[in-house]
Amino acid sequence: MSARTTSEVVRQATKSLRKARGTSRTALPKPQSNRPEHGRQIFVYNHLQKNHVVYSLTRALKNNASLSQLPFNGKKTVPAALRKDLWHPFAQISFPPGHGEVGLSVFQKLREYRRRHELEWGDEIRYDEKGNFTNKKVRGRKICDQKANSVADIAAVLGRLELQEGVEEVQKGRIGLQGEGSGEKVEVLWNDLNDAEFAETWSENVEHGVWRHHKHTLDGDMDIVPVADGELGGIETLSVEPEKGSKLVL
């Protein structure tokens, strides 16, 4: 029996080691992420002082993505960074599993509507109650206050998902709302249930609840407090007078 040289032993050991590594890679399954499907959840946050509203696809606010949604109304109107102590959860919109593309389309529409509110405003912002022309600082403060408008936008966009006959399905990548008229069931959880009353009506495909955001898990399971009958005053046919200074413009 011939003795093997040291180089042959090393070469054989290297081959065996590579083979073992390749076997372990194929044998071990990829770890599954506990994150919900992208677009399945939309998180809405509200600024405590200025009533800014930003939409996010992640539970944690991202600095650049959130700052890009704030309107520029002059010098120092957009901060250099977010102060997370001034932002608090406002609402969460959830779609059924496998319908993330509908959520992404709704997310796009909500941002489009909010941008129109910031650019297409009428005399209620231009003039005060006495009919005098408001200064730039007051106008900027009114434009930043999008809390009531955002609730009305959510009701309007989700209402377009209500089941309708004769509505053509929007193809992926086209301008429009994915799932329009399909009867898509949507769940809206509110930090304060009274905020839902900023909208005049809600469609029947929308269910409401209280957002206990501190008890949520990463896989999308939610601790839901159902809304009792009549708690929102019949929210499907709700028509309320907004408080002074609130806006319900669509």
Image (spheres, rainbow, N blue to C red):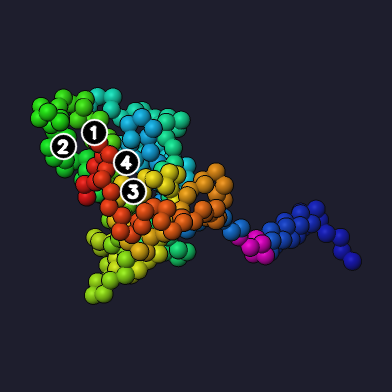
Instruction: Name the residue rendered at 24%, 71% in the picture.
Output: 167
What is the crowding at mark 2: few (fewer than 14 residues within 10 Å), some, or many (at least 20)?
some
The answer to whether 30 is drawn above or below residue 73 in the figure is below
CB under 8 Å between callouts 4 and 1? no
Q: Is residue 71 visible?
A: no
Tags 3 and 2 in contact by the CB under 8 Å rule?
Answer: no
Three-letter amino acid code at disc 4?
A: Lys
Circle number at residue 142: 1
Looking at the image, residue 140 sits to the left or right of residue 20; the answer is: left
Residue 29 shown in magenta = yes
Q: In which quarter of the image is the N terminus?
A: bottom right
Instruction: Please give the residue where the numbered disc 4 appears in the rendered image.
Output: 147
Pointer 4 or 3: first along the chain: 4
The residue that disc 3 covers is 197
**x%, y% of residue 201?**
29, 56
The mark closer to the camera, 2 or 1, is 2
Label 4 neighbour load within 10 Å: few <14, some 14-19, many 20+: many
In this figure, which residue is indicated by the disc labeled 2? 124
Q: What element carries label 4?
A: helix
Of pointers 3 and 2, the one earlier in the residue sequence: 2
Regarding residue 205, the answer to whether it shows in the image is: yes
Mark 3 touching mark 1, by CB under 8 A? Answer: no
Q: From the viewer's perspective, is residue 186 above or below residue 71?
A: below
Query: In this orientation, which residue lies closer to the viewer: 93 or 78?
Result: 93
Q: Give the range drawn in magenta.
A: 25-30
Q: Distance between the residues labelled 4 and 3?
A: 12 Å
Contact between labelled residues 2 and 4, with CB atoms less than 8 Å apart: no
